[in-house]
């Protein structure tokens, strides 16, 4: 298979076109076309026909197809099911806020992490998305919706730090001044806690927001619902988070799904406070969303609010995440790599 041209940086594209005998300015022309969401090289009308044919013969230009588009009747959230060039599918969510439009993108087809409350991991990992395919999710969501994207969250299907190199390349591409130019402070990356990659990301000192899916402050509970904890337990994960803060100066956001009878007691809140002591953090409580295959149930609303108050009373910034797109299974933990007949 030919290499994906959209996954190339401007510098790489300049070198590739130089090998074809093209002047340097051609690379910027091609790069601009790619980041405007063209679906074929023929659309690059300021290039010669011969160059367009040469590019088509040597490179793959990805452009996903909309298999299904659903819009929530509750809040206007839009969920896209995209078909990729190899027939695999992933989901992307467009959320509208007063501060701008946010797109939640997938980083893998399926997920290998096995979290008990998440539909994305059912069926395991199929493959990792390329940087260009992740960029496509942002580009074509913007083009299809007609809404300018101002914020990105890597919280869809897959574990971003399991696809580390491609995700870092995507971040470089989407942040490029010659591309979509979305600033790092407008990007959040969510991880279940792959410690070596958190430390590697810390060294890059990117100014994005790191969101860590914690969901329990003790190893026994967390290992039960998140298998990754058996490899990198809570203390090791939080130590990496402290290093990340020291290196970047960026406050960590901890995602915490409220699960009835599992992690929502006052005693658990007290332990969470103890574990986070001294670490600048924001805790985002997430009312658990329904996943048909999971027996786990959401905490009662009053339990969530009491948990929040316990944290806030001790000076920890804590919010309850607004549930968006629940009527179209577009909320946290509900995304899937494809629709089965039952879900269609």
Image (cartoon, rainbow, N blue to C red):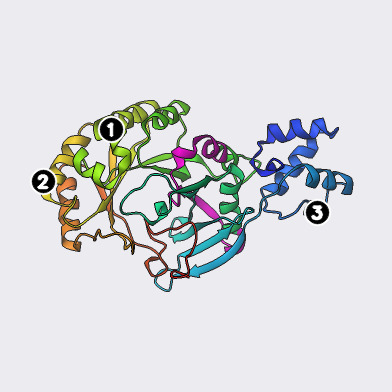
| Disc number placed over residue 42 in the picture, else none | 3
Q: State the residue in front, 39 or 231.
A: 231
Q: Residue at x 41, y 68 (%)?
A: 75
Name the side, left or right, on which 314 lies relative to 226.
Answer: left
Query: What residue is shown with label 1?
Result: 238
Cα distance, mark 2 to mark 3? 62 Å
| Among numbered discs 1 and 2, the one appearing first in the sequence | 1
Q: Which residue is mark 2?
A: 267
The answer to whether residue 313 is visible is no
SS state under label 3: helix
Residue located at (76% from left, 43% from top): 29
Q: Which quadrant is home to the N terminus?
A: top right
- Badge 3 vs badge 1, beta-carbon distance below 8 Å: no
Image height of 295 relative to 268, above or below: below
At mark 1, the secondary structure is helix
**Which residues fall within the magenta stretch?**
143-171
Residue 220 horizontal/vertical position (percent): 19, 41
């Amino acid at each position: 298979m030919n290499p994906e041209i959209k996954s190339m940086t401007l510098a790489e594209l300049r070198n590739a076109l130089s090998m074809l005998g093209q002047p340097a300015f051609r690379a910027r022309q091609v790069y601009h076309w790619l980041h405007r969401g063209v679906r074929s090289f023929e659309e690059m009308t300021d290039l010669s026909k011969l160059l367009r044919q040469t590019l088509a013969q040597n490179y793959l230009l990805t452009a996903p197809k909309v298999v299904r588009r659903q819009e929530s009747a509750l809040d206007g959230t839009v969920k896209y099911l995209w078909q990729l060039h190899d027939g695999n599918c992933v989901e992307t969510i467009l959320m509208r806020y007063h501060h701008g439009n946010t797109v939640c993108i997938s980083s893998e087809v399926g997920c290998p992490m096995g979290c008990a409350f998440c539909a994305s991991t059912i069926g395991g990992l199929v493959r990792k998305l390329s940087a260009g395919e992740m960029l496509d999710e942002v580009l074509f969501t913007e083009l299809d919706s007609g809404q300018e994207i101002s914020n990105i969250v890597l919280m869809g299907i897959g574990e971003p730090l399991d696809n580390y190199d491609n995700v870092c390349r995507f971040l470089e591409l989407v942040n490029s001044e010659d591309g979509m130019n979305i600033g790092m402070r407008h990007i959040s990356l969510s991880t279940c806690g792959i410690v070596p990659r958190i430390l590697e990301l810390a060294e890059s000192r990117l100014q994005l927001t790191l969101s860590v899916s914690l969901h329990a402050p003790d190893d026994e509970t967390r290992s039960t619902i998140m298998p990754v904890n058996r490899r990198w337990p809570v203390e090791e994960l939080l130590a990496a988070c402290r290093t990340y803060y020291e290196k970047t100066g960026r406050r960590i956001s901890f995602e915490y799904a409220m699960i009835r009878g599992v992690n929502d007691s006052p005693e658990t809140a007290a332990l969470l406070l103890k574990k986070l002591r001294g670490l600048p953090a924001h805790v985002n409580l997430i009312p658990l969303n329904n996943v048909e295959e999971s027996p786990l149930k959401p905490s009662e609303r009053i339990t969530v609010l009491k948990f929040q108050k316990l944290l806030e009373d001790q000076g920890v910034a804590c919010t309850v995440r607004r549930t968006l797109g629940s009527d179209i299974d577009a909320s946290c933990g509900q995304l899937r790599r494809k629709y089965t007949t039952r879900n269609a």
